[in-house]
Each structure stands twice: as structure tokens, then as C-alpha cells.
Image (spheres, rainbow, N blue to C red):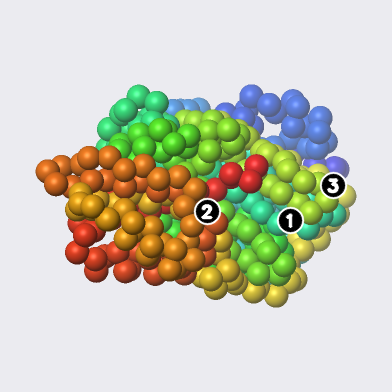
Amino acid sequence: MEKQSIKLGLMGFGTVGTGVVRIIQAHQDDLQKQTGLGIEIAKILVQDAEKSRHISSMNSLLTTDPAELLDNPDIEVIVEVIGGIHPAKEYILAALERGKHVVTANKDLMALHGAEILNKAQEKGCDVFYEASVAGGIPILRALVEGFSSDRITKMMGIVNGTTNYILSKMSQEGADYSDVLKEAQALGYAEANPTSDVEGFDAARKMAILATLGFRVPMKLEDVDVKGISSVSKEDIAYGKQLGYEIKLLGLARRDGEAIEVSVQPTMVPKSHPLASVNGVFNAVYVHGEAVGETMFYGPGAGELPTATAVVSDLVTVVKNRKLGVNGRGMVAPYKEKILKDDSEKLSKYFLRIVVTDKRGVLAQITQLLADKNISLEQVIQQPYNNGEAEIIMVTHLSAKSDMDGVIAYMEQMDIVSKIESCYRVEGGDK
Ligand SMILES: NC(=O)C1=CN([C@@H]2O[C@H](COP(=O)(O)OP(=O)(O)OC[C@H]3O[C@@H](n4cnc5c(N)ncnc54)[C@H](OP(=O)(O)O)[C@@H]3O)[C@@H](O)[C@H]2O)C=CC1
Ligand SMILES: N[C@@H](CC=O)C(=O)O
Ligand code: NA
């Protein structure tokens, strides 16, 4: 007799796992109508089976033994929402080895070991989907793989970490304190188990590596991404940025010029007129530019229980539909282009630079001369008194090479007249 439902093993019953259960329960009818099969949760793997849960009706399904999911031949799909590399990687590979399809929200794992996992899936004729791993509820991976399959993407610029966007928005809008807002983001379930991943930019870097691999069709690695987090962003930087017409965002940038690619994550000044400047709170947005399509933008909640779970359950629906069509494991296209990375002289950007100098005649002229000697010209300059006998100079440059800007900073660090380099940010989105 034809099966009436497909059984899944859920690994992890925290923020995202709870959302997955809620959506499967609440939308069961719709899911069944779309796929022709019900979705039944057969077992749930957790770390502590005694812990009290938001949904107590699932208690009889809890186990701490992964074999109860992996060795159960009735379970056809594993949903991995444990997070981290180990033991998630071993569980996923074991599931694929046994011919089970996998849906995961794990960007750490997919950014580091995605190729190995996808190869194993292909060998075993299984699906692996990971839409929730980038920009939570926004279907951006699907858009890159399917929606833009006919185009050549030149640029992806994204706010892809909800926690840091929540922190920067509250600092900018309410003058809130960094560490207080981080605690709020943790309480709301946005932050990673170790929030250093969020605030130091590693979570966003993993997501940008995934986006660049799928968007540019090259095998990008995590170490190819230049990373800087938000822990050094000060209230003063935010205030000066505003004064000059910018918001500071933790921006992921993946840009291709010809065949050469750069990928970075760093706090960046974005003009207030750019749509990314008004993406606030836990919201994420990914701006995608394609040679043929031109500009597009995808916006939505980047973290949180239900938004993230929608992406997981949608992947599950695709697995079930593929199963009906008998095409599991055939939809993946491995990166097929050679990876050519830009060197620093090819990475062009405007820069915002804030320095403290000795306040005496000719200092500003010396600074602008230094910049000119390093091929950097200025678009805006503000000088104002700082402490006793010192002045603050805030500059925005025209397009400059990263290598030239790094040279300027290194030189300024040795200059007697420069007492402090307060901050240096890239400025992006002005060409919009
Ligand atoms: N939270 C979010 O908004 C988003 C999260 N993600 C990703 O989703 C994944 C899950 O995140 P989230 O739900 O927030 O994480 P949580 O910390 O809330 O939940 C983790 C779950 O995994 C279980 N678990 C942890 N370690 C083990 C282990 N060794 N063996 C068995 N079970 C284990 C925990 O068990 P127990 O309950 O017993 O402690 C818990 O149920 C991560 O990869 C994360 O990056 C992606 C997008 C957004
Ligand atoms: N910690 C992440 C969760 C989603 O990926 C974030 O804040 O974006
Ligand atoms: Na997504």
C-alpha cells in the first residue's frame, strides 16, 4: 500500500527545533496537500531528555541516543538543528551513508565541510538542503540556485547576521549599550550558542562563503573571507556616521570584477539613502546584482524560532516532492568555476577614517598630502577640537585600493602628529 506519511528524525529541540515541530503541527493539512504525504516526527534527539520543553506533547519521542534515529529504517529524513561541527557532521554523514535525506540549518558545518557533505549526498542519491543556514526565513539560497540560474551574479551585499543588526540598530536608534543589547538578542534566541561567532563576524562570514559559492559558482572557503566584527564599533562612530549621512551595518560583501572575486564581512558605512541602511533589528537583507537582471533585494527575518523553521520545513517539502518524482539527489550543481581571488590592490572602496592629531598649523595639510602620496583623494573632511591641544579629523575618501589604505594606516601609526587612529570603515552602497 502507498505510504500515507514520511517519517523524520529531528536532531535538536532548541529554538529552531521547537519551531519546526510547531510548523509541522500547525500546517500539517497544507503540507499534505502540497506533497501528497503527511510529515510525521518519529524521534527527537536532544542532549538532556529530562529538561522541561516548550512542547511537552513530544516528550515520549525524546532520546539521547542518535542510533534511535540513524538506525531506524523507517526514518527517511534527518533534520539537523543541533548546530556546531561535532557531532552534527558525524550524524549527517552517517544519515547519508544510510540513504537518509538531510535538511540542516547549520552554516558552520556547511561553510566548512559543505563539499564533503554534498559529495556524500550525491554518491548516495540523497538530498541535502540548507536554506535556513543563510538569512533565516529569506529563501535566498533557492533564489541563487534556481531564480538566478540564467544570470551571472556580480555582487551580493548582505546584512546576514540578525544578532549584530539587532545590536547596531538599538545602538543607533536608542543609544543603547552594546552589552545590554547583546543580552537581549541572546534572550530572544537570535544569538549562537557562543555569541562571539555573531559579534566577531564569523557567523556572517560563514554565510557569505555559502552565498559566494552558490552565487558565483566557485568553491569559496571560509578562509577566503576577510572578517571583522562589531565589538570595536563605538557610539561616536555611529554618531559621526549619521552626521555624514551614513548608518553602520555589519555588511557582507561578495563582489566579482571580471573573474576576480573578493568576499568580506566588516562594519561598513552605508548611505542612509541605500535600502540596506533601513534594515533594522533582527531583519536581514541580501542585495543581489546580476549582469542581466540588474538590482534585486531580498528582505526578511534572519533569525528566530518560526522564521528559521519555515526555511527548514520548506526544504523538507522539497525533499518529499523530489521523493514523489523520484529525483532525490539530482538537483545539486557543484561549483564549476575556477576560484580567482583579488589581491588587495584590486579591492576598491571608499573609506571613512577618524583620527586624532596634534592641533597645530599645517597638520591637516600633512595628512592630506600623505593621502595624496598614496593615491587617495578625499570626498569629505571635517576637523574639530578634541581634547587639550588635539583635534579630530574625520574623512571620507573617494574609491581607493585596500592596499593603499592599509599603507596609509601603517604610516599614520608612526607619525608623531597622529595620536590615535580611532576608526577606519569601508563605505559601500554609494553607487546605488
Ligand atoms: N536560532 C536561530 O535564530 C537560528 C539558528 N540557526 C542554526 O540552527 C541550529 C540550531 O540553533 P538553535 O535552535 O538556536 O540552537 P539551540 O541551542 O537553541 O538548540 C540546540 C539543540 O540541540 C540539542 N543538542 C545540542 N548538542 C547536542 C548533542 N551533542 N547531541 C544531541 N543534541 C544536542 C540541544 O539539546 P537540549 O535541548 O537537550 O539542550 C538543543 O535541543 C544552529 O546550527 C544555528 O546556527 C540558523 C538560523 C537561525
Ligand atoms: N545567530 C544567527 C542566527 C541565524 O543564523 C544570527 O543572529 O543571524
Ligand atoms: Na534562508
Q: Is mark 1 within 8 Å of ligand 3?
A: no
Residue type, numbered disc 3: Lys
Q: Which mark is residue 286?
A: none
As helix, strand or loop, the secondary structure at mark 1 comes to strand
Residue type, numbered disc 1: Ile
Q: Where is residue 194 in the image (x, y as percent from the top left)?
A: 35, 50
Tell me the distance, in whole angstroms, between the alpha carbons under discs 2 and 1: 25 Å
| Farthest residue, direction front | 361
Residue sitting at 23 percent across and 58 percent down? Answer: 418
Which of label 1 and label 3 is nearer to you?
A: 1
Quick check: marks 2 and 3 in contact, CB under 8 Å? no
Closer-to-camera residue (374/78): 374
Q: Position of residue 177 (x, y in %)?
A: 27, 32
Q: Which mark is residue 153?
A: 1
Q: Mark 3 points at which residue?
A: 324
Tell me the distance, in whole angstroms, between the alpha carbons under discs 2 and 3: 55 Å
Q: Earlier in the sequence, mark 1 or mark 3?
A: 1
Tell me the distance, in whole angstroms, between the alpha carbons under discs 1 and 3: 32 Å
Residue type, numbered disc 2: His
Q: Position of residue 391 (x, y in %)?
A: 23, 46
Residue 384, picture quadrant: top left
Quarter of the picture holding the C terminus: top right
Q: Earlier in the sequence, mark 2 or mark 1?
A: 1
Closer-to-camera residue (320/412): 412
Closer-to-camera residue (421/392): 392
Q: In this view, does 93 lie above or below 23?
A: below
Q: Which mark is residue 398?
A: 2
Residue 299, picture quadrant: top right
Which of label 2 and label 3 is nearer to you?
A: 2
As helix, strand or loop, the secondary structure at mark 2 comes to loop
